[in-house]
Image: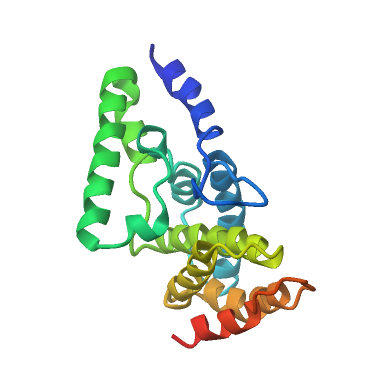
Amino acid sequence: MGIHAYFRSLNELERIIRCPGKFKFEEHSVSAHSWKVVQYAKTLADIEEKHGVTVDWKKLYEITSSHDYGEIFIGDIKTPVKHSSMELRKLIQQVEEGMVQHFIEEHIPEDFKAIFRQQLREGKDESVEGLILEVADKMDQVYEAFAELQRGNTEKEFIVMYRNALVKIKHIKLHCVDYFLEEILPDMVNEESLSPIDIKRITEEALAL
């Protein structure tokens, strides 16, 4: 089927719902998540460049726009499950990467296989672009969980998601992380809310870790 198979498969990302099995005021698809991660990453990269950091924009767009493509094959596995142990995380990543590679071998024309292997690779690494992807990915978890908590959703998983994502972001050494924590997060936390959940306290506890 050639590259048509890849283009056709993208529709499946619209039907995969994040954080399955939990009550949510608002559903988010993997496709919508990927789009938001790209938007976050653009601004985060701009902040890095303002501090003199060189950003490989082609790489950044490749890894942010495709970072969850493998979920077409395995679905969205809840973050607490996925990260419950390093061994499990590695096994899930191996399965996901193996299925992506199988898809490329089976459907992508020979002339494009190397390109697709590059574009659909695991993008989170210690490079500037890989770290920006990590921050952007966790930022969307923060925003998704915050929106649920702000509306009064008492599902414990969203508190855990919010706290863990903030802790992860805090420990990534980038200029854009400092900006997020000092300029963006306070605006978020100070939004008016009728929620019975003390979001400000949860935020302060996470940042103290």
Vertical arrangement, residue 102 with respect to residue 89, above or below: above
Quadrant of the rendered structure where residue 96 is? top left
Vertical arrangement, residue 114 with respect to residue 123, above or below: above
Q: Is residue 159 left or right of residue 84?
A: right
Residue at figure coordinates x 47%, y 51% from the top left: 60
Residue 109 in sight: no
Residue at figure coordinates x 60%, y 43% from the top left: 32
What is the total number of numbered labels drawn onto the structure image? Answer: 0
Q: Quadrant of the N terminus?
A: top left
Residue 47 position within the rendered picture, expressed as x and y whole percent measured from the top left: 60, 68
Residue 65 in sight: yes
Vertical arrangement, residue 185 with respect to residue 79, above or below: below
Quadrant of the rendered structure where residue 148 is? bottom right
Q: Check the image and tell me how it is coloured.
A: rainbow
As rendered, which of 106 and 45 lies closer to the eye?
106
Residue 115 position within the rendered picture, expressed as x and y whole percent measured from the top left: 35, 32
Residue 190 position within the rendered picture, expressed as x and y whole percent measured from the top left: 74, 78
Residue at figure coordinates x 33%, y 18% from the top left: 107
Which residue ends up furthest to the bottom in the rendered image?
208
Residue at figure coordinates x 48%, y 68% from the top left: 160
As rendered, which of 65 and 113 lies closer to the eye?
65
As rendered, which of 55 and 79 lies closer to the eye?
79
